[in-house]
Image: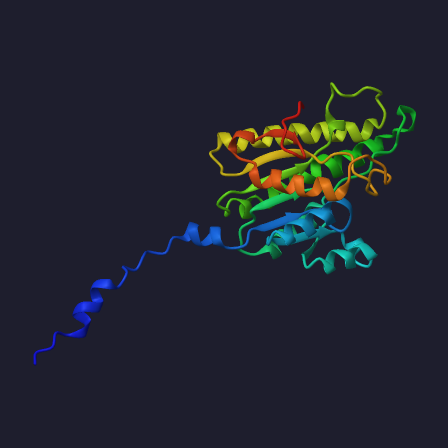
Amino acid sequence: MFHQPVCHYFCLFLPLQQPFNQEAGMALAKQNVLITGANRGIGLSLCKEFIARNYNVFGSLRQESRDDPSAAELKETGANIIEFDVTDENTIAAAFDSWGDKPLDILINNAGAPTPPRMWDEVTAEALIDKFRVNAVGPFMVSKIFMPALEKSISPKIINIASNSGQIAANKDGKYMAYKVSKTALNQITKSLGMQMEMTKSKVIVAGIHPGWIPTKLTGMTGPDKMDVQIPKIVKTIENIGASQNGGFMDAEGKIMEF
């Protein structure tokens, strides 16, 4: 009896091999998130939430915080710890050098200086400069130095943790001048950097988010908003931010706020 070659039948059903799609492969990989000031407060809670959502999280802290109990708490979350000071360009550059070739999908500039001094006659030049360096210059320099890693992502985002204290029209009492000045400057950085990303056809989206008034060490453990309520809202908003919100300022739920 004559038999046809077996492969004559089976070869018809073999699927064609598809070419490897690099972007599709990257999209299936865990996204990398870098959160500054991650060892306490909002930063620590953001780390926990992103890890729970299966992100690959990197949390930064300063070298002098290495032996602080808060560093151990950050380590317990499972986040990858990176040491740098947002006011020290050399340490930021060293951290970037250790980052390697992986893309940075989301950069969250969360590290910040607290609100005091309260009254105008308590404000010194040093206080103004210190708040400005931490709350405005720091986020910009981290964004600038890590930009090459952001550009490697399919949909990179820079999120600046902003504050309604930076809104000039909302300033009703003039208190905490140094802090407010620095947060107003951060809003301008968010807007300006976002515009320049768009002008240069960059994929990077820049946005500022006011997290609410959450009790943290920075706020003196005061505030009406609850951490466990606000943090999931913030993360959802970050995930949903698109090109139409580039350079924008919004609350935890993604509602647009005036600068």
Q: Residue at x 80, y 31 (%)?
A: 179
Q: Position of residue 186 (x, y in %)?
A: 69, 31
Q: Residue furthest front?
A: 1
Q: Quadrant of the C terminus?
A: top right
Q: Residue furthest bottom?
A: 1
Q: Residue at x 72, y 44 (%)?
A: 86
Dividing the picture into quadrants, the one containing residue 109 is top right
**Residue 68 visible in the shown view:** no
Q: Residue furthest right?
A: 121
Is 104 or 14 nearer to us in this picture? 14
Is 207 or 182 nearer to us in this picture? 207
Is 258 or 231 nearer to us in this picture? 231
Up/down of 43 relative to 114, above or below: below
**Residue 174 visible in the shown view:** yes
How many marks do you count on the picture? 0
On screen, residue 104 versus residue 175, left or right, reads left
On screen, residue 13 versus residue 182, left or right, reads left
Q: Residue at x 78, y 59 (%)?
A: 72
Dividing the picture into quadrants, the one containing residue 138 is top right
Q: Position of residue 29 (x, y in %)?
A: 51, 55
Up/down of 37 relative to 118, above or below: below
Q: Position of residue 168 (x, y in %)?
A: 74, 21
Q: Residue at x 76, y 42 (%)?
A: 227
On screen, residue 195 versus residue 209, left or right, reads left
